[in-house]
Amino acid sequence: MPPRTVSNPPNPWQSTHVELLEPAPDAKVEVFEEPAREILSENNSPDIPFRYSLNPYRGCHHGCAYCYARPTHQYLGFGAGTDFDRKIIVKTNAPERLRARFMKRSWTGDTVMFSGNTDCYQPLEASYQLTRQCLQVCAEFRNPVSIVTKGALIQRDIDVLQELNERARVSVYVSIAFSDEAMARAIEPWASTPARRLQTIRALADAGIPVGVSVSPVIPGLNEDQISQVLEQAADAGATGAFMILLRLAPEVHTVFRERLQATYPNRVEKVFNAITDMRGNNLTGTGRNNRMIGDGPRWQAIRDLYQLQVRKLGFRHNRETEWIAEDKETTFQRPGDQLSMNLE
């Protein structure tokens, strides 16, 4: 793809917004290394189906136009547009902070979600290996893990995932929103291709790792007609679980997504936004009465019915429309010292 020029929506956390007086420069990748004070984020929102998440990186090179995490970059003084794709923060001490948290007596072994805010298997992980090291800590402490990713790089860590699957619990969901390769490249420009992600599902399934597919986000007027094919291809590759989420657009994401759609599929812009507005009850963000990850109205019901029909037809054992974390079970968590004490008793 041609280089992208710098483009960010106004940051609501800053009092000024700079308008360029000349053409915007190309957006170049910048990496910022920083130690984290804490590595586990906790939430109590009814809209988020997990309590703890771990993000070794902030920002994401995949550049998905619809990414709900874009506004979080603004808290750092960056923009939600190309800054989110090109200014990546690396939490260099993530494994050490995770180990320190697990050693606290207050930690009781809740499932840790990788990543929740950005993709833990974005390209920088190939060199930093922070996700791998954090997974190794989880395996050592027998702490359950759930992962959602577009990154084929996860195949590198099959050995650690197998250990986690034996010693604790692990589930992986590979996100595939499109079966149309060209459309995926337009909307998710630097993520692995759908075909490559299907290969990843097959590799994980062949290795005995519980793996599913996230058909997300559903973008009515753009990819709803691809849901069945994505499910079929994922099932053929070995996926046994599935979930889907309807697109939600915070104001800054709305700007980024509309610009990308206008540049790549201009004839679909109004169709897409009218459909989303209809399903969200004139509420694009999915807050208020639609604060779950689902929609409303007859069109959304038709999408759900099609999805459910395919899920049953294909024999998926796990089907979570809005939940993807493994069921609550007795924790497997165990500190290494506790294990030693048990062996001595």
Image: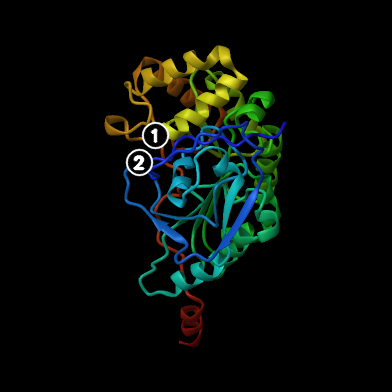
Q: Which mark is residue 47?
A: 2
Looking at the picture, which amino acid does disc 2 mark? Asp
Secondary structure, mark 1, is loop
| Nearer-the-camera pick, 151 or 78 | 78
Vertical order, 230 against 114 (above or below): above
Quarter of the figure with the C terminus? bottom left
Q: Is residue 36 left or right of residue 329?
A: right
Number of residues whose C-alpha sits closer than 10 Å to that of mark 1, classed few (under 14), some (14–19) or many (20 or more): some
Q: Is the residue under label 1 in contact with that under label 2 (CB below 8 Å)?
A: yes
Residue 12 showing in the rendered view: yes
Mark 2 vs 1, N-terminal side: 2
Q: Which residue is mark 1?
A: 293
Residue 167's image quarter? bottom right
Residue 246 showing in the rendered view: no
Q: Residue furthest bottom?
A: 344
Secondary structure, mark 2, is loop
Vertical order, 263 against 216 (above or below): above
